Image: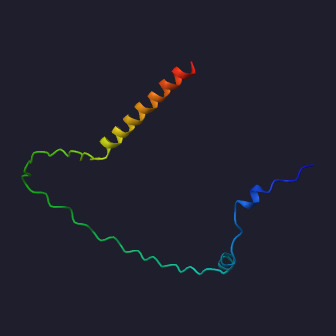
Amino acid sequence: MPAKSRRKRGKTLPPSKKNKVRASTPTVVMQEQVTTRAPEPVSPPEVPASPERKPAQTARPETARYPHIAAELWNIGILAVIMLAILAVLASVLS
């Protein structure tokens, strides 16, 4: 009967002595006492007698700028052309 493989055992290192000592010492956790304050009464906001109407400003989302995209697309295009040329040469040679 063949012996068991020992590959699995070598992938992880045994814990060091420092880790064993740290794991065995209990840690003390201090808890803070939470005090709750009574909510203070909030006065209602004052409403003006005749509210002025301002034109609504629509918030336009800021467009993200990626200056490196054009260079990356250029590199991808060059690599695609090179790969297609290699495939065409291989297809003609192997057929």
Question: Residue 77 at x, y = what percent?
Answer: 37, 34
Total labels: the figure holds 0
Question: Residue 3 at x, y = what percent?
Answer: 88, 53
**Vertical placement of 95 versus 16: above or below?**
above
On the rendered structure, is 48 left or right of 12? Answer: left
Residue 63: quadrant of the picture: top left
Identify which residue, 38 or 9, lies in the foreground. 9
**Vertical placement of 26 versus 4: above or below?**
below
Identify the residue at image location x=48%, y=79%: 32
Colour scheme used in the picture? Answer: rainbow
Question: Residue 15 at x, y = what percent?
Answer: 69, 71
Identify the residue at image location x=35%, y=42%: 72
**Vertical placement of 36 versus 55: above or below?**
below
Identify which residue, 42 or 70, lies in the foreground. 70
Looking at this view, name the residue that lies furthest to the top: 95
Identify the residue at image location x=93%, y=49%: 1
On the rendered structure, is 2 left or right of 88? Answer: right
Quarter holding the C terminus is top right
Identify the residue at image location x=68%, y=74%: 16
**Vertical placement of 6 versus 67: above or below?**
below
Identify which residue, 29 or 68, lies in the foreground. 68
Question: Residue 44 at x, y = what percent?
Answer: 21, 62
On the rendered structure, is 8 left or right of 4? Answer: left
Identify which residue, 14 or 44, lies in the foreground. 14
Looking at this view, name the residue that lies furthest to the front: 93
